[in-house]
Image (cartoon, helix red, strand yellow):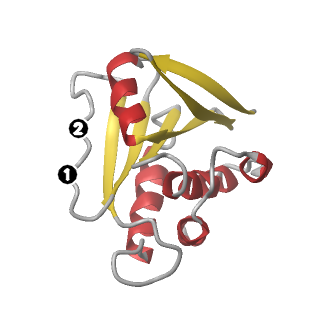
């Protein structure tokens, strides 16, 4: 099941792509949305893939939210080819290991980047494929523009193990 939901948090409204895949929920969020959600969403058991721009501080999620079981912090720029500052195969392998080690212990994956449009969408798309879900919603969405470089690296890593 794939659907776009409009959420309102403290007067701010935003769209969240909510994907239910084989008992796994995948949410694509911006940095601001993810921090806000960490203070109000205490349901289930979730892991977070948090992507920041290079040289930015780690996102600080609500440390008292017991539903957040693990956070993977990565730092790379939103670029569409290999090079300085780009996502690497090592980043993709970290995502693979992080997800595969915990997928039976959580029911939700938040994929968060600065704007929640490109890098997080590309990685979420690879996770959808990994879990066997149709990715048509991404190509029909005006909200997301998946970074295909991030998608391809993550998809390749997920196939390796």
Estimate the x, y position of residue 99 in percent, counting from the top left.
47, 51
Q: Which residue is painted at 54% across and 50% down in the image?
A: 117
Q: Which residue is painted at 26% across and 43% down in the image?
A: 59
Count of labels shown? 2
The answer to whether marks 1 and 2 mark residues whose Cβ atoms lie closer than 8 Å is yes
**Relative to 16, residue 40 above or below:** above
**Relative to 44, residue 159 above or below:** below
Q: Which residue is painted at 19% across and 51% down in the image?
A: 57
Estimate the x, y position of residue 149 in percent, counting from the top left.
56, 72
Give residue 56's quadrant in the image. Answer: bottom left
How far separated are the C-alphas under marks 1 and 2? 9 Å
User: Does 24 sit left or right of 116 as displayed?
Assistant: right
Instruction: State the residue position of label 1.
Output: 57
Label 2: element kind? loop
Q: Which residue is painted at 66% across and 50% down in the image?
A: 128
Quadrant holding the N terminus: top right
Label 1: element kind? loop
**Relative to 53, residue 156 above or below:** below
Bin the neighbour count of mark 1 within 10 Å (Cα to Cα): few under 14, some 14-19, many 20 and up.
few
User: Does 15 sit left or right of 62 as displayed?
Assistant: right
Estimate the x, y position of residue 91 in percent, counting from the top left.
39, 68
Q: Judge by depth and name the residue closer to the eye, 95 or 32.
A: 32
Instruction: State the residue position of label 2.
Output: 60
Bin the neighbour count of mark 2 within 10 Å (Cα to Cα): few under 14, some 14-19, many 20 and up.
few
Quadrant holding the C terminus: bottom right
Give residue 95's quadrant in the image. Answer: bottom left
């Amino acid at each position: 099941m794939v659907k776009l939901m409009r959420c309102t948090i403290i007067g701010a409204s935003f769209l969240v792509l909510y994907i239910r895949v084989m008992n796994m929920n995948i949410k694509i969020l911006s940095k601001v949305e993810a921090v806000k959600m960490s203070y109000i969403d205490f349901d289930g058991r979730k892991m977070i893939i948090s992507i920041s721009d290079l040289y930015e501080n780690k996102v600080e999620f609500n440390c008292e939210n017991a539903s957040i079981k693990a956070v993977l912090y990565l730092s790379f720029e939103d670029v569409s080819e290999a090079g300085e500052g780009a996502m690497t195969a090592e980043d993709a392998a970290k995502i693979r290991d992080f997800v595969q080690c915990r997928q039976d212990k959580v029911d939700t994956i938040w994929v968060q980047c600065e704007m929640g449009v490109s890098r997080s969408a590309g990685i979420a798309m690879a996770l959808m494929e990994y879990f066997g879900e149709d990715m048509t919603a991404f190509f029909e969405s005006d909200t997301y523009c998946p970074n295909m470089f991030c998608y391809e690296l993550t998809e390749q890593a997920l196939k390796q193990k």
